[in-house]
Image: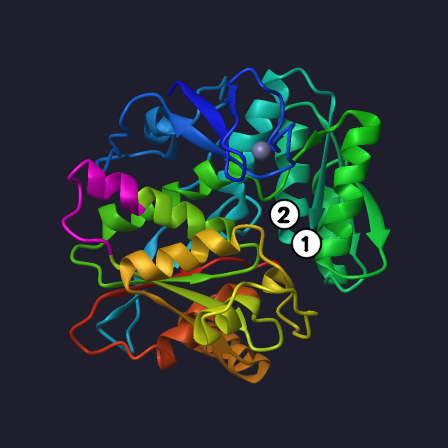
Amino acid sequence: MDYYLKCNICNEKYGSNYAGQICGSCSGLLEVQYKKKVEPNLDAESFWDYEDQLPKSKYRHYLLGMTPLVRAHESRSLFMKMEIQNPTHSFKDRGSAVELAKAAEYGFNEVVCASTGNMAYSISYYSKLYGLRSQVFISTDANKDKINDIESVGDAQVHWVKGDFNKALAQAEAYSKKHKAFLTGDYCYRKEGQKTVAYEVMQQVRSLTHLIVPVGNATLISGVYKALKEMKAADKIRKMPKIIGVQASGCMPLVRAFKLRKPLSYERPRTKADAIAVGLPTFGNQAMEAFKETKGYAVAVNDRELEAEKEHLYENYGIVAELGGVASLAAYRKAGIKENDRAVAIISGANV
Ligand SMILES: [Zn+2]
């Protein structure tokens, strides 16, 4: 759909021909604003049936999305959304499919991103499909097994950064300026792609009461919130489910801000759940708004609970997922969800 971009900080507007995702005046985050009211399609049969709800581009219809929903046999109130069945085994592919189409449309030869692992894997894969080179900046804290995958799926060049994700992000941004590479990652186009998870979930489950979402950079949770608002505004759903955000207790800036009712502040990650180890979530403020507007909340789970959940999923369902990927399940057990509720836990990644 036709759209423009608007800065979240200084409100400056940019046409869809603006080849970037960060405000040129104040470096604020841009947001996609559609020119017409969004009418989410809740009868979709393919991911690409959502094309009218995404920023206009020359998309190539590669296979992704439409992931299965599995009902848990241990509880009637729990459903698992299997985002691990996307091409690179994580929810990131929805965002990459949108973002890389834009990069190709603007005529770039190269893209750059910072990542804890899954993002780089997904961007490397889609950039290769779109004929683009990719440079990925990865923290030395990241999971080494994932990095081997990245080098085998695409032509990504990996740059190791001593420090955490936020350090890697600063270097990726500097690289993009210096080499005129399209900066990809947790920005506005990715958020639009991530939005589609919520369309699918609301199509798959009726009367959903809780949507449990893992939080790293908070792009997924803010995308899900945007989609729910669109569906509500278009009268496609009666009520928004409560949005529950999950972080690892070793890296929980959002949980802390929510519980203490304080502004978000940086926290050094200390968790083995690398996919959600982000010390200062880019879309954190939007996640806070999502909790407020849906009467949702933030939950922390520790690494021991994540390990137990990962084992549980394998032993009872034969499903392999990573620690960050099962965070929503661990949160389900302690989120105060009742027998008659209907909750969806997003199983977000399986790169182990
Ligand atoms: Zn601005």
Label tally: 2
Q: Is residue 176 above or below residue 170?
A: above
Locate residue 97, reporting x and y percent.
53, 33
Query: Which numbered marker is on residue 119?
Result: 2
Tell whether 346 sits left or right of 180: left
Report the front residue among 242 and 76: 242
Identify the residue at image location x=53%, y=39%: 9
Amino acid of disc 1: Gly
- For the record, the magenta segment spans 228-240
Identify the residue at image location x=46%, y=34%: 63
Report the front residue among 228 and 143: 228
Q: How far apart are marks 2 and 1 (CA)?
A: 6 Å
Locate residue 335, reporting x and y percent.
35, 77
Residue 117 visible, this angle: yes
Residues tagged 2 and 1 counted as in contact (Cβ below 8 A)? yes
- How crowded pointer 2 is (Cα within 10 Å; few <14, some 14-19, many 20+) is rated as many
Task: Specify whether tag 1 is near ligand 1 (CB below 8 Å).
Answer: no
Locate residue 331, reporting x and y percent.
41, 74
Secondary element type, mark 1: loop
The answer to which quarter of the image holds residue 39 is top left
Secondary element type, mark 2: helix
The answer to which quarter of the image holds residue 109 is top right
Q: Mark 1 points at which residue?
A: 117
Report the front residue among 252 and 128: 252
Quarter holding the C terminus is bottom right
Quarter holding the N terminus is top left
In reply to whether residue 32 is colored magenta, the answer given is no
Dividing the image into four quarters, tell me where ligand 1 lies: top right
- How crowded pointer 1 is (Cα within 10 Å; few <14, some 14-19, many 20+) is rated as many
Tell whether 221 sits left or right of 29: left
Locate residue 120, reporting x and y percent.
68, 46
